[in-house]
Amino acid sequence: MAAGAERTVIAEADPRRFMAVFAAAVAGRGEVFLTDPAWGARERGQVEAGLAATPPGHEAERGWLMIPTGGSSGALRFARHDQGTVAAAVEGFCQHFCLGPVHAVGVLPLHHVSGFMAWMRCVLSGGAYVPVAWKAVESGIWPALPEHPGGWVISLVPTQLERLLQDDAAIERLRHFRCIFLGGAPAWSALLEEAADTGLRISTGYGMTETAAMATGLQPEEFQAGARNQGRPLPQVRLRLEADGRIVLAGESLFRGYFPDWEANRELTTEDLGRLDPAGHLTMLGRRDGLIITGGEKVRPEEVEAVLRATGQFSDVAVLGLADPEWGQKVVAAYAPGPEPEWSLVQAGLGRALAAAKRPKQFVLVAPWPRNPQGKVNRPDLAAAVRDRLQLQREDALPDFP
């Protein structure tokens, strides 16, 4: 944690340490930046350059809380929030799910909007928040939870739910939660059906850092009755669709702009596509751009490609997001024919520059390398070639950097 009179940057992995530092920073009434302690040199460099170029602001009450996001482009940015946007999100959440005090088990990192808002819902509603390491939960070590009339909730990403469903004891634990909020990445249909078969009270939803997490949410009763959409908008959210299906958001929980800019009373046109049924339920249809969302993390292909090219090991390379039952999408790098890359140099370059979620999980040689008439890579043809290659060759025969 680095602090000054008007600015605090928090990079804490331990949740209790994070909460203590955050409370002290808020008491100081300055700008507060949440950052991922696992970021690589590239992400840290972006933060340092942005802070150096922008002096601390003078707006004491609005837009002082900076939460990291990939934004609509996937590039690292900070969405401005404050007590007003966060409180509106919490109030709308409680109304939507008919909750009084929110009592939550927290397994998601607090620097991420999903983990942060899980904590804030408890703080602002007068409930209990119990942080616990995901590795402990995954290994079967759950906290002892006192009885509360309103019950307990937990927020998970699909990958976590998939792993817990492999253990009968974990399933039994999950059955005791009033609601299991599932977000961060698209959940695949087989996972949702498996969760339904076990009787879990799942709520799928749609949201982002810019909306202080959840913007729509499916009631667990609707899920148990067979609904498989993202639910209705929360009370504080105004949602509409453009003619091309893009989702447009507004409302009291919407962010105040991307740091260092500041703005309010605006709409956010996303690159997410959706449709609304007559009852107002949102169904997500995918993304309009090429952004990859893997395990809840946004990955901009151009950023990863730049790092790969900088290693000097590829004559041409392109990064794709392919469907994956565990991560929603996985990052795959396709490369053109040429001298065999020195994989140790590739791995070292990725490790220095990028967070783990952004590093390709597989590398696929594609020959011939598909190009359009302008000489650029033909991405649809490349994606088809990669899928064909993966069907013919076992994944463990390909270079794999987990």
Image (cartoon, rainbow, N blue to C red):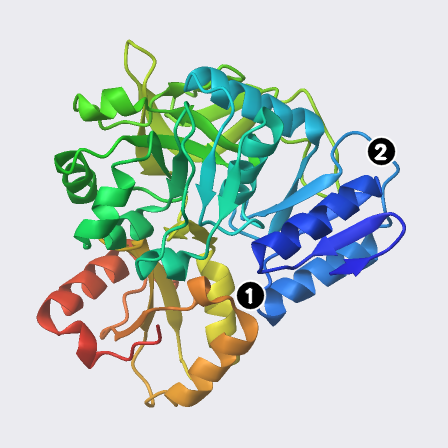
Horizontal and vertical percent for residue 213?
50, 34
* Kind of residue at badge 1: Ala
State the residue in front, 171 or 249. Answer: 171
Q: Residue at x 65, y 56 (%)?
A: 17
Q: Is residue 240 above or below residue 171?
A: above
Visible residue check, residue 151: yes
- Residue drawn at x 70%, y 32% is 82
| Residue sitting at the far left | 392
The front one of 206 and 198 is 198
Mark 2, Cα crowd under 10 Å, few <14 / some 14-19 / many 20+, is: few
Assess disc 1: are there few (<14), some (14-19) or many (≥20) residues with their C-alpha within 10 Å of its C-alpha: some
Q: Residue at 82% of width from left, 59% of height from top? A: 52
Screen quadrant of the C terminus: bottom left
Q: Dot 2 corresponds to which residue?
A: 60
Q: Is residue 272 left or right of residue 53?
A: left
Q: Earlier in the sequence, mark 2 or mark 1?
A: 1
Residue 98 in the image: state x and y as whole percent.
Answer: 42, 16
* Mark carried by residue 38: 1
x, y percentage for residue 260?
Answer: 75, 44
